[in-house]
Image (cartoon, rainbow, N blue to C red):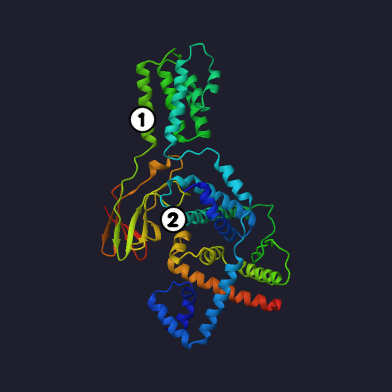
Amino acid sequence: MEAEELFDKHAAMVYNLALRLSGNPADAQDIAQDAFIKALRGLPGLRDAALAGTWLYRITMNVWKNRVRSEKRRAFWKTFSLDRGEEDGDEPPALQLASPEPPADKAMENADEKATLEKAMAALAPEDRAILLLREIDGRSYEEIAGITEIPLGTVKSRISRAREALRLRMGVLQNDNGT
Amino acid sequence: MEHKTCRENLSAYLDGELPPGERLALESHLTGCAECGRELAELKRVSAIVKKHLMEPEPLSLRAAVFAKKREPVFSAWLKPAAVLSAAAAGLLIFLNLPKHQPSEGLSCSVGSPAAAPAAARGAGEKRYAAAAFARKGTLAQAKFAGAAGSFSSFSGGAAPAAVFPGEATSLSALAGKAADKAKRAAPAEVPDVTADGLRFSAAHWRENAVSPVNGGSVRAFDARSGKFLWETRVYQIAEDADEEADVQQVHITELALKGKKLEITDERGNRYLLDISTRKADKLPR
């Protein structure tokens, strides 16, 4: 498989996986970029092109995990630092993603629906958001998701179920709050 | 099927991930349970919204960023020793061909590798400097070879001879061979797959994970009939030394054998492991 082919086929999914894991577009681009650079270096050793997606998504997960680990270390030292920044709020902010078109009528409804989804997604754990993306968008089987995330199969099943249930409840509450 | 179990299984049912028996039991429950029916409809609605809105277009700058970085030269682990040795040997040969009074400054312009020429030209006195320069700029193998090149130079008295003599050439190739042996390994042997209960198990010499450059120790499972990849698991971990070349650290699987419901794995060091196929948990067997 050629580098360009690998990128064209998987760029959208790798970026979105990184976006759901990190929760913000700037970090998502960094993670996706690092994941592709690592993958392209290892590409000559990839024996089975059919496994490229699984392999690439796992690299993306690992790049994200490594970043989280180093951020935790930084946060640990920041705790003891004299120039501490502001504390984070209890709830992570919803993704603020620009809409490509100005909302009107049907588009407005779509924009509301999307905003509600983003708010509900923000309450999920990063890995649950990633699992949901792999299932709903990429159509990965539970086995494949277990392989990519290195989470046991039974846990994948329960996390997908829990994530959907949480979204269902939260979206219901948010829609009621908005009077939709 | 109990109502509670049914609710827990609705999501997996929606994804077509329930075994046939459980699927039939759930469908039978659904015919008489309006609450589970409503819940399933709600899950379908949430799933549709997620499918509709979850993807964002990747930034256009991503491609440029990835391929700009990719163009920076990177040698694979298998090619590194050859590239390093070629550069170092070229530097050494140029040095040996120079007249005695040739100032060494000119050498840095003649060779591709920035530190190889000074290492050879300045002799044993500065070999530590050259090795350190390699350690900063290149790989450990480069640093080791720079040190070795310095030794060779001191053996020949530190004076630059006008031509390469047969004895010196032999010493050089022997030196190069020794360094090459140290920095590479033979490719792992092919391991026959093992099939059981509709699954085919294969030794994965090359992990589908380029984050760690050290390969070996993984087993992959495929559906025996369709060939579809199912899962991959790491049977044993390999201690990773960042100062060593990745390929020499690899410990590959040499044999797979079925032992009842478990898979016995033997590695290149003669260690044996028993992998439980259902839980994917591996235990090391006593030697």
Residue B166 placement: quadrant: top left
Q: Crowdedness of circle 1 by 10 Å Cα count: few (<14), some, many (20+)?
A: few
In the rendered structure, find residue A50 and report the number of the disc placed on it: 2
Q: Does A10 appear above or below B44? A: above
Q: Secondary structure at mark 1?
A: helix
Q: Position of residue A180 (x, y in %)?
A: 69, 78
Residue B287 is left or right of residue B57, and the answer is left
Q: Secondary structure at mark 2?
A: helix
Count how many numbered circles sit on residues in the image. Answer: 2
Q: Amino acid at mark 1?
A: Lys
Nearer to me, B42 or A124: B42
Q: Crowdedness of circle 2 by 10 Å Cα count: few (<14), some, many (20+)?
A: few
Q: Position of residue A179 (x, y in %)?
A: 71, 79
Nearer to me, B11 or B215: B11
Query: Residue, x 40% and y 48% (percent of image)?
Result: B215
Residue at image mark 1: B178
Q: Position of residue B178 (x, y in %)?
A: 36, 30
Q: Position of residue B74 (x, y in %)?
A: 50, 39
Nearer to me, A137 or B166: A137
